[in-house]
Amino acid sequence: MKASDRDLRGMKDDEFVDILEERRCSSDLGHAFRTFNPQPYKGGPPCSAADLNKALLDSHFLHRVVKEVAMETGSSQEKVMEEAGEILVEMSHNLHLPFIRLMGYTFSKVIKRLFTSIFVNMDGLNTLQQAVQENPVILMPNHRSYVDFLIISYILFTYDIPVPVIAAGVPLAEMKIVGEILRRSGAFFIRRSIGSDKLYWAVLSEYVRGIVRHGFAPVEFYVEGLRSRTLKSLTPKLGMMQMVLEPYFKGEVFDITLVPISISYDRVLEESLLARELLGVPKPKESTAGLLKASRVLQEDYGSMQVNFGQPLSVRKLCEGKINRSYYNLVPRDLPMKPSAEALACVSWLAHVVVGLQERGSLISPWSLMACLLIQEPTTVLAEQGLLWDDLTEKTLWLRKMVLDFGARLNWPGEAPNSAVMSSAISLHRSIVYLKAGRVYLTQEEVPLRRHRISPEEGVFRTAVPVLMLAAYRNQSLHALVRPAMLAMSICITRSTQRDELFRFFCFLQEVFANEFIFIPGNLSQDFEEACLCLNSCGAVYISEQEVRVSEQSSEVITFLQKLLQPFIDSYQLIFRCVCEEEQVQVFTEKQFLAAVRALALKLILSGETESELHTYETLSSDTQKNVLSALCRLEAVAKLRTSEINEFKVNKAAVRRITDALCGKIPPQMLQAPPDARL
Amino acid sequence: MASSSSGGSGSGSEMQRTAQHRISVIAGHLRRPAEGDVAVRAEECKAPQSRLEASGDGRTVPMKRHEVMKWNGWGYSDSRFLFNKKGQAEFTGKRYKLSGMILPALKDWFEGTFGASLQHKSPATPLLNTSAVQAPTLNQDFVEELKSIGVPFSHEAEDRAFRGHGHCLHEIFALREGKIGRVPDMVVWPNCHNDVEKIVALACKHNVCLIPYGGGTSVSSALECPPEETRSIVSLDTSQMNRILWIDEKNLTAHVEAGIIGQDLERLLNESGYCTGHEPDSMEFSSLGGWVSTRASGMKKNIYGNIEDLVVHIKMVTPQGVIEKSCQGPRMSTGPDIHHFILGSEGTLGVVTEVTMKIRPVPEYQKYGSVVFPNFEQGVACLREVAKQRCAPASIRLMDNEQFMFGHALKPQVSSIFTSFLDGLKKFYITKFKGFDPSRLCVATLLFEGNREKVLQHEKQVYDIAAKFGGLAAGEDNGQRGYMLTFVIAYLRDLGMDYYVIAESFETSVPWDRVLDVCRNVKARVVRECKDKGVQFSPLSSCRVTQTYDAGACVYFYFAFNYRGLSDPVHVYEQVEHAAREEILANGGSLSHHHGVGKLRKEWMRETVSEVGVGMLQSVKDYVDPKNIFGNRNLL
């Protein structure tokens, strides 16, 4: 009985423990003043924040760069050094145990209000505890909410593991008081746009390398670079990753341990803010006053949160055969050097591997499964007629089985009856949908009383906000479904059963959507195999050496998966069309591009021209729009011009049309470019 | 003989006196303290001279090596470590300072470090089973002509088996199991340069493979007979070419036959008041010719230089004839130095027969010393500073914590309560009062040489630098024990192998800025590889910085593990050693500082010296030895 419950939840072997349970029955003050006694790092004695800064300012590396910068700018070395010192003051952390305690106390108070429970996997913590003693550890959580920021420190403090130093954005440092608290809790601050500021890069990279080399405290950073507005994993940013790994490449440490951490939320605090941001409402600047104003979010319930510490990864093992460390043998240790192409490829690959593991480690909530289904309904139906509750629950259970077949990890409470689980999910997310008389409806913001009329555009936005929120929760499941869905899409578009043709189209889709979903470079054939096996496991296809054939009785799987990806296809096609449409325009800026896309999408939604209107709501998301632009650049259909300070883009319409045609299956798969040889 | 006459010339008694002093100095780290001078002369206590006596001058190495030395282990047959009935370690024989002493701490260290137990023994095959040695493939025409020129030779199994190996772990391990692979088909003992010329000419004429053999202390598989060799293999043992032909006191050079072994050379020169100062750790057994052909390094190179700095003139017999320079000018600009084709040629081009070497008057005063550092990082920083100020003593070595502990385990039984009390006090002072962490501290051992005043001055300078890096002077005793460790380490390996523990050492040279990285990463790699390869017990992985240079240092590693539970321990060990070398190269270390390449490290030559570099060496080989008479297949 118990075992089957476990299986249903998809949390097979891991022991997840609710750390809030203890906090609810014992004193927070006692917790904050607990004796904190982590196992020390074997590689060397502890090193204070001040020692670290001093070592940096004394380093040959920095002195070299300072000399260069002084030469280039014509100012004196002392002045440049002073500047470097200032950068360091702005940047450096000042980790203090008493502040960790203070933070712990406040944090206990806040999270108990917000969340019903915080599940943490104990075996992950145990292996981490071992790992921090052996090698420098890099904690790499995904980033979905501001709450992520200190939760790891809080957990590590609770379980006697050295608290990390955390890479944060400078805007946080500028918040009054809060910035200082964060700094003393171990945050260090990085400017958002560094550009070509050589001195800044030098200070930052040496600072990060210094922390890694000393190894006494784990480094925590978000490899995705920012909070994901769409709750989907973002293409990893490589700058920080490279800095963190360089000590290994140079042999300054024996090994580095990467720990992917997956944080999943039943409900994200910032959900509506994120949707608004995607629709173009600017993000409020981080400020203490803003934080206090936002305290009304404390009144609401956000369900539970799951923190899954992944298996520690040895960089040394992963890089075996991928990197030639003797690259650095013939130059001085502290000479600023561009990494080799090989090293860059390896960094990128590792970053993708980590994000992939973050995805696989996240737990899919029942609500996210429901969102997958809800968003496939036409908006008008959801907004006006509503969807039959019984249909939704039945389909959700069907989807749950399928997702489990695909090997995903689910967070489906085993104790309660399924219907209760689903209705509580609905009530947790009443900001998006609500249940009335056996039907589910889309929640739309009240129209302010004093305004009688709202413009059609405002109407669209009223609907777009909950739809994009819904899409975001759907995205929480996508990582488990995207590979089989791409195969299903390949089957539907090519109408082929030939394995090699499907593989070609599959590769083409990966290439087009590489900014949308995380694919590990050089993993194409494994991804395809995995997709085949998934569809086979739920009985949707039969596979043989040469063929992948759809089975008649479970076509609903293929249909579902195809509809899951359809919004992406539609959005991309629409934007491609938009790029090609404007006859005279050859060159545009990003701003012009975004405005044009938005105008076209709005026009189409309002005219009701497209058959199923809902898809185009996602076209309104600036995230999608930017991804398409990056994809077009990557596919060399659009060229980035660096004529002025603003980036301008030049479009090659023929190339865009070719992609458009390929995407609707007008180009036979054998004519598509052969999949590139597996890189790495 | 020249050597004996030169000893008596000039101010005889004065020289005799310095010579005596010099001998006792060497005895300092090699032998028992001189009681009379009995213990100084190794031959006093060795087996009776071989009946095939050649030079008759009472040298250490007879033609029949196995009569004095172990056939399947290191060194003299009468000297070995063992655990006595009480379970205490002792060192047998009378040759060394440690001989006859009880080492009470060794057992605990041994069992604690390796998880070994005195209950679990893995004894060696006691006697060579001559029937296990393949019958020799003889080239009859060659043998006939050899007889006619009157050079002694043998094709007895013992002689041949002895010359088919060096002292790599896998070689000794196989011998202990009684396994004998391809060995030379015969052994010849030339007596002088002319003999060698004749032998090489005959070998060319009859297409016989020659493998020069000096002291047999190779640790690079250089002496292994290539299994693919189908010709008759003749081991050319230079041990009987062991005379000092003349000493030139005006130019301070000595002309020496290349077969002489280190201890004999040093002793004979000492009798004339001179020394070469070349003291590799193997100097008890290794030969001058071997040093030249492997680019050897001595522990006192800071004063005297490495072998390439010490040689003035080399004579080598090659299949194309004799190669030598026409004069003894101290430096020449005559194209690439032809000595550098010979130095490090590892027996692939010919046989070094005679060498003119620099000599120095025996130093009047010698002093050991040691410094304890709170951690290895500080120690390396201190050595770097010493090198920077160019004030390195004759020898300066920095042992890591593991090796420091190892050295301590070799402390002989303390004779009085007072000494043990003092030891306790010292330990208390360092760990409690000075706050050194016993699991991190490390020790540098020092050896100063020169005139007394300068030595004391020098000593102060070095200790002052050490103090800046948190170093505390830790006495002469610790220093001396450190050097002793390097001389007995090979004997200790045999002891380990009696109890399922196998061990090996390897070395590298590395720029200063990478010393710490190489040490840390290679040690860690050894530990990780052992674990990955299924070694059940945690290994000993230890290193020392053993030489300093202006631009870098030489690092020496020991690794050892308990192989109980492994089906193929030698294979595991080879994989670990291979991985360790990969790690060294990846971290900017060299392929070898002084052990050479042999066949063990050949695979990395291309990446080490580049494609063109290998081609250059190959073209020299092709010209000098087109028929591959010197067919040991080392290096390339």
Image (spheres, grey):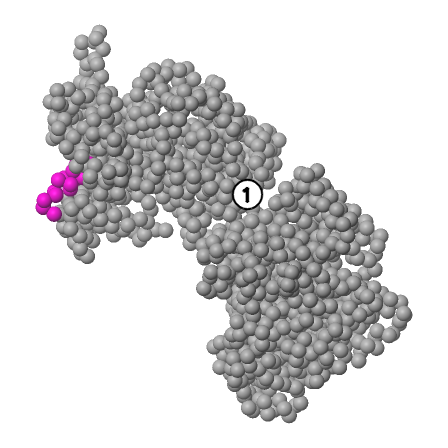
x, y percentage for residue B155? 59, 85
x, y percentage for residue A387? 13, 26
Q: Most extreme residue toward the front, as rendered? A: B86
- The amino acid pointed to by label 1 is Gly
Q: Most extreme residue toward the top, as rendered? A: A450
Give whichever of B530, B114 is nearer the camera. B114
The N terminus of chain B lies in quadrant: bottom right
SS for dot 1: loop
x, y percentage for residue A30? 47, 23
Q: Is A70 colored magenta in this rendering? A: no
Give whichever of A60, B25 is nearer the camera. B25
Report the side of A486 relative to A87 (left or right): left
Q: Which residue is mark 1?
A: A43
Q: Is residue B292 visible?
A: no
Q: Who's the residue at 20% across and 26% down the image?
A: A420
Q: Is A554 colored magenta in this rendering? A: yes
Looking at the rendering, the stretch of residues picked out in magenta corresponds to A551-565
Report the side of A276 relative to A140 (left or right): left
Report the side of A143 relative to A540 (left or right): right
Give whichever of A505, B486 is nearer the camera. B486
> Which secondary structure type mostly characterizes the magenta part of the structure?
helix
Vertical placement of residue A344 versus B2, above or below: above
